[in-house]
């Protein structure tokens, strides 16, 4: 698909790999032991490695190519914008940025009608927290265990996952609480209703003991992503909204991963009929073709900064290439029914297919998700629910399973004992069926590690 012969692609890839290992310092990795895969071409839900081998990209890279790779309208929009005007600084008006803000505001719930643009998700979280602190005059932020909010300092301190541990220097004012997760309930609940009620009681107690008048914000991924794709029970987010209203706390919904179609709706809060005060987004807003993120801001928080300057900004806020890509992405998603496709795939193909695999393979503890946002929770013992890999680490069984799925041609996202099936929202039915077949035979390998 990239116009090269296999031989040319091999030569290019070999040189890219050699230079990468010599000069590139990679994220989240022990540098000397890393063997990263070369991607030489990509189209839709497929990618090709440096040898010309095809894979189904059910990782969506880092769960962001919601519109698939190389969508022609988005590629053309970036090219047109580059030819017209590559860069305009944030203190000036630019048509791509204005139009992107209008389109985003047309899909955000309630009064989230103003957009502050960032370069990605973590800095959106940083700014949302800063806005909440200045708006309330309070400093604490409550975040969930089993969450991820980004790699910058405040965002990683908010993260409720082992990725925080090595970064856990003294950041004042972050308190973690448990959210609902019935399969591994912290509350000894046996039904969704119990889990919901007890998780809300636990949050209420956390607020009471931290002191409501010290709490600026509660930040929540509406559907936690890399921490396990745990769809909250009905009523949980509405309960959080009510607690925030009761105590004057800003509700920040982190929609960086779950937003822009991934859950089968424009935003995952839309499943629960809840409007947060601030909403962070990135990834799917332009499918990561050019880095972009942002914060959607409600009217009362906008009003805080109507007469008083907002003390924050970024050189590339609302960059023309990134926002032109967002305009083309959102327009194509509207015109081509991309969000509807994600919902239908989840309901009719991917969800039922994964449930069938869960029934067949003892190594699958649970599958859960919505749209094109699914987790396969792997266990070494289905009765005790012992994870196939420990929290925060890998294991021989998990590694063998992931290696088998990759050698079958499936790229997925993997965290500890979970394999996440997160294809683009544009994925076709037959691609999902093909991926399920690849997963099925990899699960035979994982079953060998079940006791
Ligand atoms: N919030 C959530 C929910 C995320 O999933 C991520 C990225 N995986 C981030 C924030 C951080 O985004 P970025 O990596 O673009 O800074």
Image (cartoon, helix red, strand yellow):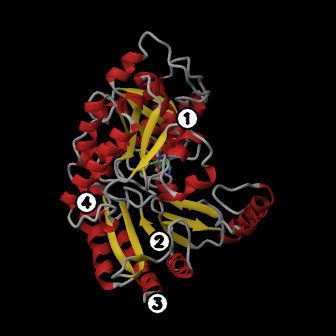
Query: If you read the primary sequence from the N terminus, does the residue marked by circle 1 or circle 2 appear first?
Result: 1
Neighbor class of circle 4 (other Cα within 10 Å; few <14, some 14-19, many 20+) is: some
Image location of residue 208, percent across then percent down: 33, 39
Q: CA distance from mark 1 to mark 2?
A: 38 Å
Q: Quadrant of the N terminus?
A: bottom right
Image location of residue 354, percent across then percent down: 32, 73
Q: Is mark 4 within 8 Å of ligand 1?
A: no
Q: CA distance from mark 2 to mark 3?
A: 15 Å
Give the SS element for disc 2.
loop
Q: Quadrant of the C terminus?
A: bottom left
Neighbor class of circle 1 (other Cα within 10 Å; few <14, some 14-19, many 20+) is: many
Give the SS element for disc 1.
helix
Task: Name the residue that disc number 2 marks.
Answer: 417
Image location of residue 207, percent across then percent down: 35, 40
Decide if residue 266 is in sight here.
no
Q: CA distance from mark 1 to mark 3?
A: 49 Å
Please tell me in which quadrant of the rendered image residue 421 appears: bottom left
Task: Name the residue that disc number 1 marks.
Answer: 321
């Amino acid at each position: 698909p990239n116009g090269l012969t296999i031989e040319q692609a091999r030569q290019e890839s070999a040189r890219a790999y050699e230079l990468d290992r010599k000069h590139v310092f990679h994220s989240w990795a022990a540098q000397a032991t890393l063997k990263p895969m070369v991607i030489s071409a990509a189209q839709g839900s497929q990618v090709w490695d440096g040898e010309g081998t095809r894979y189904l990209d059910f990782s969506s890279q880092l769960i962001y190519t919601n519109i698939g790779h190389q969508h022609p309208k988005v590629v053309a929009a970036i090219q047109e914008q580059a030819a017209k005007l590559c860069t305009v600084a944030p203190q000036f008006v630019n048509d791509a940025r204005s139009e992107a803000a209008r389109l985003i505001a047309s899909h955000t719930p309630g009064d989230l009608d103003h957009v502050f643009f960032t370069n990605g998700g973590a800095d959106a979280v940083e700014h949302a927290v800063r806005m909440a602190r200045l708006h309330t005059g309070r400093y604490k932020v409550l975040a969930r265990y089993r969450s991820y909010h980004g790699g910058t300092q405040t965002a990683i301190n908010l993260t409720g996952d082992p990725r925080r541990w090595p970064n856990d220097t003294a950041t004042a004012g972050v308190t973690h609480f448990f959210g609902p997760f019935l399969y591994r309930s912290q509350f000894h609940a046996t039904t969704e209703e119990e889990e919901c009620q007890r998780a809300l009681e636990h949050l209420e107690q956390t607020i009471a003991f931290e002191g409501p008048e010290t709490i600026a914000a509660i930040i929540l991924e509406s559907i936690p992503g890399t921490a396990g794709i745990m769809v909250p029970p009905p009523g949980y987010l509405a309960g959080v909204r009510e607690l925030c209203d009761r105590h004057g706390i800003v509700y920040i919904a982190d929609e960086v991963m779950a937003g822009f179609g991934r859950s089968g709706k424009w935003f995952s809060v839309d499943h629960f009929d809840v409007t947060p005060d601030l909403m962070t987004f990135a990834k799917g807003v332009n499918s990561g073709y050019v880095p972009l993120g942002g914060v959607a801001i409600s009217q009362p928080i906008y009003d805080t900064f109507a007469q008083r300057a907002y003390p924050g900004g970024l050189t590339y806020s609302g960059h023309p290439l990134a926002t032109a890509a967002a305009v083309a992405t959102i327009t194509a998603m509207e015109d081509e029914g991309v969000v509807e496709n994600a919902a239908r795939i989840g309901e009719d193909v991917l969800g039922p297919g994964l449930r069938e695999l869960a029934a067949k393979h003892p190594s699958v503890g649970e599958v859960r998700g919505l749209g094109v946002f699914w987790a396969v929770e792997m266990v070494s013992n289905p009765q005790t629910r012992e994870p196939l890999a420990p929290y925060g680490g890998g294991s021989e069984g998990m590694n063998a399973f992931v290696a088998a799925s990759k050698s079958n041609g499936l790229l997925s996202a993997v965290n500890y004992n979970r394999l996440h099936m997160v294809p683009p929202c544009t994925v076709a039915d037959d691609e999902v069926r093909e991926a399920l077949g690849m997963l099925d035979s990899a699960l035979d390998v994982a079953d060998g590690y079940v006791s």
